[in-house]
Amino acid sequence: MYPFLRLFYQLFLARRMPPLRPTDTHISHHLCWPWDIDLWMELNNGRTLTLFDMGRIPMAQRVGLISLLRRKRWGLTIAGSVVRYRRRVRMFDRIEMRTRTIGWDNRFVYIEQIMMVRGTVTSQAVFRSAVTDPDGIVAPDRLLAELAPDHPPITLPDWVQSWITAEAERPWPPELGA
């Protein structure tokens, strides 16, 4: 089940924090509960992705995106992700999560999230996100014009550009195999 109570708690905390600019870092804290672990007694990889929601959605609230989405009747979606898992997160570990927008291209906004336990990075994810309206994807330039019109342009890091290129070469729909 989706952890709505955790999300509402994080949104409550975020409401009490100062607003952020679109590329500022939102820092949140979480606990790895018994229902978050897998058979190997560590944070389940699927739950890791769900916990990343607990950083992205409050960050969106702090930058003013949630209220803009409501006002414009726009939606928000994830169009891709890439994750590196490097260290185990064990039951009852306290997690610090850092969430920030690292840039955008002509269609998508790219968000980096980092989980840490006791100062050590355990995982890093980059999410390709999109704002949508009834006509499809809202161009990030249009989104930024509404959200932060004076925000300077940002160049995506080379490693993100390489991921974008690799994704463009990946066949879609996937070959189903025999």
Image: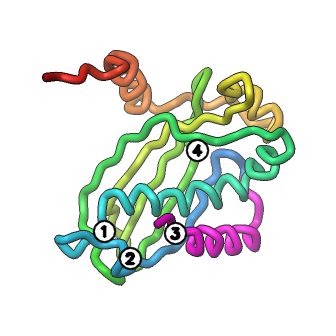
Q: Position of residue 17 (x, y in %)?
A: 73, 70
> Looking at the image, which residue is at 81% across and 45% down?
68
Quadrant placement of the C terminus: top left
Q: Is residue 149 left or right of residue 102?
A: right
Q: Amino acid at mark 2?
A: Cys
Q: Amino acid at mark 3?
A: Pro
Say whether marks 3 and 4 touch (CB < 8 Å). Answer: no
* Amino acid type, callout 1: Leu
Find out whether residue 6 is within the magenta segment: yes
Where is mark 3, residue-wise?
Answer: 3
Task: Reply above or below: 38 against 57.
Answer: below
Q: Give the residue pinned by disc 4.
A: 101
Nearest to the observer: residue 166 or residue 51: 51
Residue extending furthest toward the left: 178
Q: Are marks 2 and 1 in contact (CB under 8 Å)?
A: yes
Q: Quick one: label 3, few (<14), some, or many (20+) residues within 10 Å? A: few
In primary-sequence order, the first of circles 3 and 1 is 3
Q: Position of residue 44 (x, y in %)?
A: 30, 64
- Circle 2: is it few (<14), some (14-19), or many (20+) Cα within 10 Å? many
Indicate the secondary structure of the residue bearing disc 3: loop
- Residues at marks 1 and 4, CA–CA distance in whole angstroms: 25 Å
Residue 7 at what x, y percent from top left?
Answer: 59, 68
Helix, strand or loop at mark 4: strand
Q: CA distance from mark 2 to mark 1?
A: 7 Å
Q: Nearer the viewer, residue 39 or 125?
A: 39
Residue 111 screen position, x and y as percent = 53, 44
Tag 2 residue: 32
Question: Which label lies toward us, 1 or 4?
Answer: 1
Residue extent of the magenta highlight:
1-20
